[in-house]
Image (cartoon, rainbow, N blue to C red):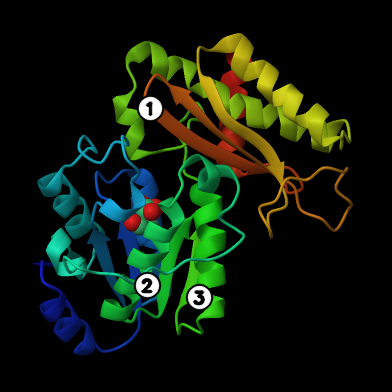
């Protein structure tokens, strides 16, 4: 595996690659969730390029860019072991000129959930992802369902701009007790880490109500989930919403058979903001089946 730090070199090497190329964009501090994205890339394509870039334009003022966890050697080792061809780790000035003035913005889908809590965040994501697509011309790019809104926005952008890349996705990878894997989990102290399982338990409870009791009233489903988070943790809910997975807009009436229903949440544990989601209208994901038995034992 080669580590590439300049845009010109990355372009040159990519152009020389025979066969298909999968791309996994990351901000580093790689965990099993990232490795699953990479495995999916390798399953689909002949070559894999991974980027590590803590993208300044997707962080708002006062957010955690300065303390965002980093582990360049550990990350390189993981990519190497997994069979990645190139690890692209550009510096900020390789990606953004000092007077850069072009922003890619997808309207509508980013107005709710993380988009309203973190103004400008998705413009930063779509701008940097477009830049990477331009540098790497991947055949396939792989994203995780944990960032469901991000995935929907990137898909819309690719469609609207006729970009020649297929967007693939994989289910959220979880710890054994259900907590969605995230680089930010490492900010949690032991007590917060134990409490953070309320998030997946809350989603599971709403899923059980939707599938098992046929509960459809959005406010009632949200209340079931909220009650778990509020009773069993000191987490502060940033948002907890039932949205249409195609538009990301809140569902106000009981969803019909052919409508989707995505329950999405962001919860703060002190300064650490964790996100998670579940499709209530779909079967329970495998990773949550395991968590359900852990929750029952405790
Ligand atoms: O999901 C992330 O880690 C980031 O938003 C991404 C896609 C790497 C863009 O910076």
Which one is nearer the viewer's eye here, 37 or 81?
Answer: 37
Rounded to the nearest angstrom, the CA distance separating label 3 from label 2 is: 9 Å
* Relative to 27, residue 197 above or below: above
Q: Quadrant of residue 189?
A: top left
Q: Secondary structure at mark 1?
A: strand
Which residue is at a point 64% across and 26% down the rendered structure image?
202
Please say if the residues under marks 3 and 1 sit with CB atoms less than 8 Å apart: no
Neighbourhood count class around disc 1 (C-alpha, 10 Å): few under 14, some 14–19, many 20 upward: some
Residue 177 image offset from top left, x and y in percent: 50, 26
Which residue lies at the image location 10% right of the left edge and 66% below the top edge? 5
Mark found first going from the N terminus, 3 or 2:
2
Residue linked to disc 3: 158
Sequence-wise, which precedes: disc 2 or disc 1? 2
Q: Is residue 80 above or below residue 156?
A: above
Quadrant showing the C terminus = top right
Do the residues bearing badges 3 and 2 touch, measured as CB atoms within 8 Å?
no
Mark identifier at residue 272? 1
Q: Secondary structure at mark 3?
A: helix
Which quadrant holds the N terminus?
bottom left
Identity of the residue drawn at 73% across and 52% down: 244
**Residue 237 can be seen in this image:** yes
Residue 121 versus residue 87 in the image, above or below: above
Image-based side of 173 in relation to 25, left or right: right
Q: Which mark is residue 44?
A: none
Q: Quadrant of residue 15?
A: bottom left
Q: Which residue is mark 2?
A: 130
**Disc 2: CA contacts within 10 A as few (<14), some (14-19) or many (>=20):** some
Ligand 1 is in which quadrant of the figure? bottom left
In the image, 82 versus 265, the foreground residue is: 265
**Where is residue 218 shown, x and y percent of the image?**
81, 36
Q: Where does the image place residue 100, in percent across and percent down from the top left?
A: 24, 69
């Amino acid at each position: 595996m080669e580590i590439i730090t300049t845009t010109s070199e990355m372009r040159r090497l990519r152009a020389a690659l025979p066969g298909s190329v999968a791309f996994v964009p990351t901000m580093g501090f790689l965990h099993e969730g990232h490795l699953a994205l990479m495995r999916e890339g390798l399953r689909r394509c002949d070559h894999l390029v991974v980027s590590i870039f803590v993208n300044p334009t997707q962080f708002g003022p006062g957010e955690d860019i300065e303390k965002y966890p980093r582990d360049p050697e550990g990350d390189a080792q993981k990519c190497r072991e997994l069979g990645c061809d190139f690890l692209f780790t550009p510096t900020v000035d390789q990606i953004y000129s000092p007077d850069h003035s072009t922003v890619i913005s997808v309207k509508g889908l980013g107005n709710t959930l993380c988009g309203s809590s973190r103004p400008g965040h998705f413009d930063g994501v779509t701008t940097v992802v477009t830049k990477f697509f331009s540098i790497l011309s991947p055949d396939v790019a792989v994203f995780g369902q944990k960032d469901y809104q991000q995935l929907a926005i990137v898909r819309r952008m690719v469609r609207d701009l006729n970009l020649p890349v297929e967007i693939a996705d994989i289910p959220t990878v979880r710890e054994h007790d259900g907590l969605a894997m995230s680089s930010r989990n490492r900010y949690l102290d032991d007590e917060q880490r134990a409490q953070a399982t309320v998030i997946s338990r809350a989603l599971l409870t709403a899923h059980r109500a939707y599938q098992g009791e046929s509960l459809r009233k959005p406010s009632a489903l949200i209340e079931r989930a909220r009650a778990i988070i509020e009773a069993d943790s000191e987490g502060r809910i940033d948002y907890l919403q039932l949205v249409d997975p195609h538009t990301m807009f809140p569902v106000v009436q009981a969803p019909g058979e052919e409508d989707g229903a995505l329950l999405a949440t962001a919860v703060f544990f002190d300064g650490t903001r964790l996100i998670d989601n579940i499709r209530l209208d779909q079967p329970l994901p495998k990773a949550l089946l395991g968590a359900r038995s852990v929750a029952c034992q405790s």
